[in-house]
Image (spheres, helix red, strand yellow):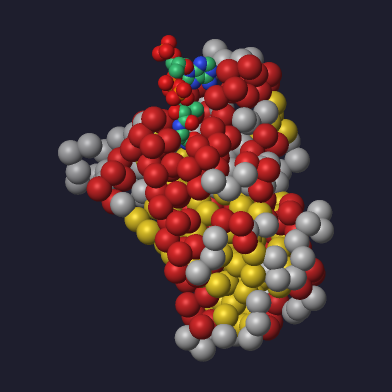
């Protein structure tokens, strides 16, 4: 028994900000951003928060799966930019779509968040606890990005993507792994809220650690190493070889990272589905947005072997081999 993706969905805010638009606010250029990252434009929210993007995605997924919200057993939202600390974004999704019978909670694993959430849903389903789940990655990174820092603000975008999964006796998740390396958690941080209160020494709650801060080179090294090792392990455990894979859906952080991964794994670059040129890095939403595009284009046929793989803050990684 396994877990199968039945339907996918995605939503990104309408407003598109190009590299040229960014060059008007920070000292950068389309040439620098495109060459170093592969990103050309990104969707940036005009005010709609993370739950709004997640709810739109959830409604689309329900419609495409052809199911009623009341039949959902589990809703997991992955995000590092939730509207609130509490309620969880998943609880807002549950309320808005009317999934009265579901259990809902959020997970926080940055850009690997969707992989972590899907892995958890898979475990519940394989254990026989639940028959189905809706898993969503949703982010408004624009609210934790320092728009005066050219080294980070050019990288990120807002959006949401997700999938409805069900217990399956045939195709579905073949092998997966998630992992963390907390020792280097400080190479990528964001959203810090200081402990300040009327009895504390510092009662100024503003802190510049709120913004995304990153050691780009260290993240680059971690990403290329961890993803390659993780993919190798998953393929080996599944008794599969790179030639079996029709598409790899990588976390859409940076085209140069994908090039290194492609070379090291000897999987041709053309097999990697790339849309970071239009979305930038949407953290936990990046893999499901790309998966949804691939699905919408009708490029996936039943039984195709696809590989989802990502890395993120934490530091975290996750890889999944799927028979579509
Ligand atoms: N426009 C113009 N110049 C810039 C910009 C910009 N947007 N950003 C940085 N620079 C300048 C720097 O100031 C520096 O100038 P200097 O040499 O005069 O000091 C020069 O460009 C080189 O800067 P580096 O940071 O060394 O540039 P690098 O080639 O390492 O590229 C990048 C930076 C793209 C972030 C790279 O390190 C990288 O790809 N890292 C991987 C991290 C990543 O992709 N993170 C995404 C989010 S994290 C995640 O998804 C888990």
Image location (x, y in percent) of residue 289: 66, 52
Tell me if 286 is positioned left or right of 67 in this view: left
Tell me if 32 is positioned left or right of 145 in this view: right
**Nearer to the camera, 152 or 146:** 152
Residue placed at 78% from the left, 57% from the top? 299
Image location (x, y in percent) of residue 183: 25, 48
Dividing the picture into quadrants, the one containing residue 203 is top left
Dividing the picture into quadrants, the one containing residue 317 is bottom left
Dividing the picture into quadrants, the one containing residue 91 is bottom right
Image location (x, y in percent) of residue 309: 53, 54
Image location (x, y in percent) of residue 284: 54, 52
Q: Quadrant of the C terminus?
A: bottom right
Residue placed at 54% from the left, 65% from the top? 240
Q: Does residue 12 appear in the picture of this structure? A: yes
Q: Does residue 95 appear in the picture of this structure? A: no
Residue placed at 64% from the left, 70% from the top? 323
Does 285 sit above or below residue 215?
below
Tell me if 258 is positioned left or right of 56 in this view: left
Does 244 sit above or below residue 194?
below
Q: Quadrant of the N terminus?
A: bottom right
């Amino acid at each position: 028994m396994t877990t199968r993706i039945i339907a996918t969905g995605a939503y990104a805010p309408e407003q598109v900000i190009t590299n040229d638009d960014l060059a008007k606010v920070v000292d950068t250029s389309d040439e620098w951003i495109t060459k170093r990252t592969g990103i050309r434009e990104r969707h940036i929210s005009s005010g709609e928060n993370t739950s709004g993007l997640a709810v739109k995605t959830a409604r689309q997924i329900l419609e495409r799966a052809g199911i009623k919200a009341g039949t959902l057993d589990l809703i997991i939202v992955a995000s590092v930019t939730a509207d609130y600390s509490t309620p969880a974004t998943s609880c807002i999704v549950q309320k808005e779509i009317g999934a009265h019978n579901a259990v809902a909670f959020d997970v926080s694993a940055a850009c690997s968040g969707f992989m972590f959430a899907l892995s958890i849903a898979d475990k519940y389903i394989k254990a026989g606890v639940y028959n189905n789940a809706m898993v969503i990655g949703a982010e408004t990174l624009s609210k934790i990005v320092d728009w005066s820092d050219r080294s980070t603000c050019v990288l990120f975008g807002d959006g949401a993507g997700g999938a409805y999964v069900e217990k399956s006796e045939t195709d579905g998740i073949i092998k997966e792994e998630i992992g963390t390396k907390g020792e280097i958690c400080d190479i990528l941080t964001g959203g810090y809220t200081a402990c300040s209160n009327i009895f504390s020494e510092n009662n100024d709650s503003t802190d510049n650690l709120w913004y995304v801060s990153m050691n780009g080179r260290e993240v680059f090294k971690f990403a290329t190493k961890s993803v390659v090792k993780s993919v190798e392990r998953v393929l080996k455990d599944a008794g599969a070889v790179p030639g079996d894979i029709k598409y790899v859906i990588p976390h859409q952080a940076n085209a140069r990272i994908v090039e290194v991964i492609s070379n090291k794994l000897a999987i041709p670059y053309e097999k990697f589905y790339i849309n970071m040129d239009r979305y930038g890095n949407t953290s936990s939403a990046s893999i499901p947005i790309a998966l949804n595009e691939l699905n919408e284009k009708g490029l996936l046929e039943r039984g195709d072997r696809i590989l989802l793989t990502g890395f993120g803050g934490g530091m975290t990684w996750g890889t999944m081999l799927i028979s579509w």
